[in-house]
Image (tube, helix red, strand yellow):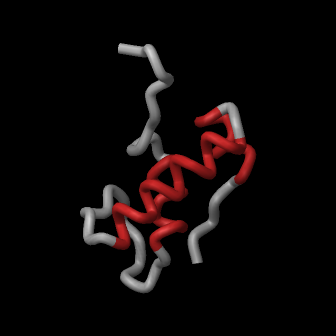
Amino acid sequence: MIDIDRDSLLDKTKSVYKLVVLATLRAIELSDGAAKLVDVPPDTKPLNIALKEILEGKITYKEKGEK
């Protein structure tokens, strides 16, 4: 199991809602066969992979209107 710090994740997104949406969308991509951006054991669930990618700064989001 991967150790993921909730507070650190919230620091990355500043909103629990943004975190949920970002992690969900990335987990769907991973389930559909997207390449993992972090090293994890092969039996790791897509949502945990997505959370680790967010925590490590590999996955980010852009606010509407940002360039």
In this view, 64 is above or below 20: above
Hey, which quadrant is residue 27 in on the image? Answer: bottom left
* Vertical placement of residue 7 versus 35, above or below: above
Q: Is residue 55 visible?
A: no
For the residue pair 44 and 17, the one nearer the viewer reads as 17
Q: Is residue 11 visible?
A: yes
Which of 54 and 64 lies nearest the eye of the viewer? 64
Could you tell whether 13 is left or right of 58 in the image? Answer: right
For the C terminus, the quadrant is: top left
Q: Residue at x 30, y 70 (%)?
A: 32
In percent of width and height, residue 53 lies at 45, 53
Quadrant of residue 10 in the image? top right
At x 68%, y 43%, the residue is 17
Please indicate whether residue 22 sits to the left or right of residue 9 in the image.
Answer: left
Question: How far across and how far down the image is residue 54, in percent?
Answer: 50, 47
Outermost residue, front direction?
Answer: 64
Residue 46 in the image, given as x and y percentages of width and height: 45, 71
What quarter of the picture does the N terminus occupy? bottom right
Looking at the rendered structure, the number of numbered marks drawn on it comes to 0
Q: In screen coordinates, is 29 left or right of 22?
A: left
Residue farthest toward the bottom in the current orientation of the protein: 43
> Which of 65 and 5 lies nearest the eye of the viewer?
65
User: Residue 31: x and y, percent?
Assistant: 37, 72
The relative height of residue 16 versus residue 13 in the rendered view (above or below) is below
Q: Nearer the viewer, residue 24 or 5?
A: 24
What residue sits 47% from the left and 78% below the top? 44
